[in-house]
């Protein structure tokens, strides 16, 4: 664990430095571009923050590799090897950022031998630094985190996201999932607009289970480690072992709750992150 502590501390400093760019742009007018759908937005700030993060890491760790949301959108393949690899979402919650909805996060994960060794999620507007190192616990601004002890689905607050998909099959699947959970019943369903912060709320115990179909590895690579280091359970929505490239995840306070959600939610087809680069390399269009 100690082997990567220096990298972790470097990553935390870098997330804070990059957040200054996000916060400076947060209240300004933004030029919005579209990626995969009218709800899949990107701005020059997303691109600038990713460039800042990658160039800073490259200057210090020139042999390390990268998977960055906006680099992939520009055509780079998603390739996770055994080499030290930084998995970066420069602004998780770009729709929130464009609308000044105050939940935007910088998500940075670090993997070696295809295993995430540490994760950092910095919720910039809230000034909440979530972090975890494999085997070292999870923290919010230095205070240890622990998931809720909830094992009864009927006592749960559920967090999920209606992502960027707007096709009928995805939307009907997502809305019927929410309908079935509400009819169990559960206490409530919430969506913050950033997968990374959604999952960190499970680690705080403030919500009990998160599920999502369609997100990407860069949205959740850091926060899945934060949940598991806070004592939570992470799995695929079909109940199998979590695979960060599958674009399906459940993160829960307990195995009982995770398995119950797995029995209720259905997935819609979406290509794996590491499948076909053409799925990501979508020409940018001017937004509104
Ligand atoms: C976002 C996710 C969010 C999802 C959005 C989008 P981005 O990531 O964090 O959970 O609902 O569709 O994928 O694009 O803001 O980095």
Image (cartoon, rainbow, N blue to C red):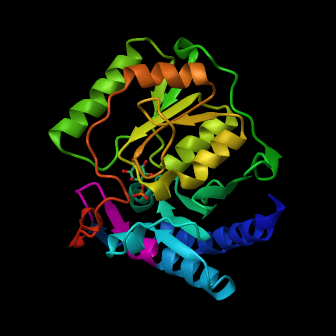
Side of 48 where 137 appears, left or right: right
Residue 216 forms part of the magenta stretch: no
Position above or below: 266 against 96: above
The outermost residue toward the left is 168
**How many numbered marks does the figure carry?**
0
Residue 38 or residue 229, whichever sits in front: 229
Position above or below: 234 against 185: below
Q: Residue at x 34, y 53 (%)?
A: 272
Residue 38 forms part of the magenta stretch: yes
Residue 247: tell me if it is visible: yes
Side of 116 where 161 appears, left or right: left
Region in magenta? 35-47
Query: Where residue 273 sits: x, y (%)?
Result: 37, 57
Residue 29: tell me if it is visible: no
Q: Residue at x 44, y 25 (%)?
A: 262
Instruction: Determine which quarter of the picture holds residue 110.
Output: bottom right
Residue 279 or residue 101, whichever sits in front: 279
Query: Where residue 22 sits: x, y (%)?
Result: 54, 69
Residue 283 or residue 270, whichever sits in front: 270
Q: Quadrant of the C terminus?
A: bottom left
Query: Where residue 223 sits: x, y (%)?
Result: 59, 49
Q: Residue at x 74, y 35 (%)?
A: 146
Query: Where residue 124 sits: x, y (%)?
Result: 61, 60
Q: Residue at x 78, y 45 (%)?
A: 137
Side of 171 where 122 appears, left or right: right
Q: Quadrant of the N terminus?
A: bottom right
């Amino acid at each position: 664990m100690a082997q990567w502590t220096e990298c972790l501390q470097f990553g935390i400093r870098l997330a804070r430095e990059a957040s200054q760019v996000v916060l400076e742009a947060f209240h300004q007018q933004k030029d919005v571009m579209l990626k995969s759908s009218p709800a899949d937005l990107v701005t020059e700030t997303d691109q600038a923050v990713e460039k800042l993060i990658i160039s800073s890491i490259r200057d210090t760790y020139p042999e390390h590799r990268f998977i960055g949301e906006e680099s992939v959108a520009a055509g780079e393949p998603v390739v996770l090897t055994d080499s030290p690899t930084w998995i970066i979402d420069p602004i998780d919650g770009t729709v929130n950022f464009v609308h000044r909805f105050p939940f935007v996060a910088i998500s940075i994960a670090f993997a070696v031998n295809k295993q995430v060794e540490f994760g950092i999620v910095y919720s910039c507007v809230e000034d909440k630094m979530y972090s975890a190192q494999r085997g070292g616990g999870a923290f919010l601004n230095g205070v240890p985190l622990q998931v809720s002890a909830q094992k009864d689905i009927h006592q749960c607050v559920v967090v999920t996201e209606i992502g960027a998909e707007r096709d009928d099959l995805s939307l009907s699947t997502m809305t019927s999932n929410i309908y079935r959970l509400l009819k169990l019943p559960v206490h409530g369903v919430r969506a913050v607009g950033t997968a990374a912060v959604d999952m960190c709320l499970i680690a705080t115990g403030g919500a009990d289970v998160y599920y999502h179909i369609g997100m990407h590895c860069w949205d959740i690579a850091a926060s899945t480690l934060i949940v598991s280091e806070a004592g939570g359970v992470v799995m695929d929505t079909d109940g199998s072992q979590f695979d960060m490239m599958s674009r399906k995840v459940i993160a829960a306070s307990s195995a009982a709750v995770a398995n119950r959600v797995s029995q209720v939610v259905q997935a819609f087809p979406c290509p794996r992150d590491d499948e076909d680069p053409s799925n990501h390399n979508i020409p940018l269009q001017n937004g509104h």
